[in-house]
Amino acid sequence: MPRINTEAFYQRAIEKYGITAEGVHWNSTQSQEHRFSILRALLPPDLTDVTLVDVGCGFGDLYLFLARQQALPKQYVGIDVIPTMVEQARIRTGCEILQCDVLADNLPIADYYLCSGAMNTLTRQETFCFIERCFHACQRGFVFNLLDGIDCSDVFNYSNPNTIVTFAQEQLGSQAVIKQGYLRDDFSVFLPRL
């Protein structure tokens, strides 16, 4: 059973904050972009020959961040389950943005998958399923972030980095690279395909 009604959760934020970082439940544009910079550093330096799927792309802010950094991939595809976000991401990026449920629908194949924040309201089992499905849809690696802490919230999904390392090794055969210490209660992960 889902932790929350995801569409209602995000729709309330969009109605309150509009097409902003806060509208996708980040504290600020600065914290959102700080997370993007950490995830970007886990990808190859040159993305010009890379296909990238942005899972939970929201309003397409990662694409706009990469464009400002002059680090756009060869092909960018966004995925989101919220219709308003899909519509806005298509307008803001001009890219292919798919409306689908990562836990249930077919996923496109790409070199890398990236996810910033889209697992923050999932249950533990949904999180493992989400990671596994994205990992199997990428050819070179999956980069994502999670909230760091004890999972005792009714809304947010907190994880322990060691749990993710163990899951990656035992279930996916991947040696997880973990980045911590850049923001309180947050960590980032790179799962390479071996």
Image (tube, helix red, strand yellow):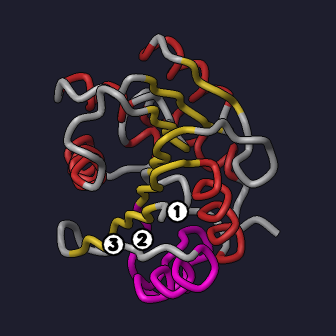
Q: Residue at x 53, y 28 (%)?
A: 77
Q: Amino acid at mark 2?
A: Leu
- How many numbered dots are placed on residues in this image? 3
Q: Residue at x 44, y 65 (%)?
A: 191
Q: Which residue is mark 1?
A: 120
The residue carrying pointer 1 sits among few (fewer than 14), some (14 to 19) or many (20 or more) residues within 10 Å by Cα, namely some
Q: Which residue is mark 2?
A: 147
Q: Which x, y percent locates residue 20?
A: 37, 32
Q: Residue at x 46, y 32 (%)?
A: 51
Of labels 1 and 2, earlier in sequence is 1
Of labels 1 and 3, earlier in sequence is 1
Q: Is residue 57 left or right of residue 69?
A: right
- Alpha carbon distance from label 1 to label 2: 7 Å
Q: Amino acid at mark 1?
A: Asn
Q: Which x, y percent locates residue 95?
A: 50, 16
Q: Which residue is mark 3?
A: 177
Q: Amino acid at mark 3?
A: Val
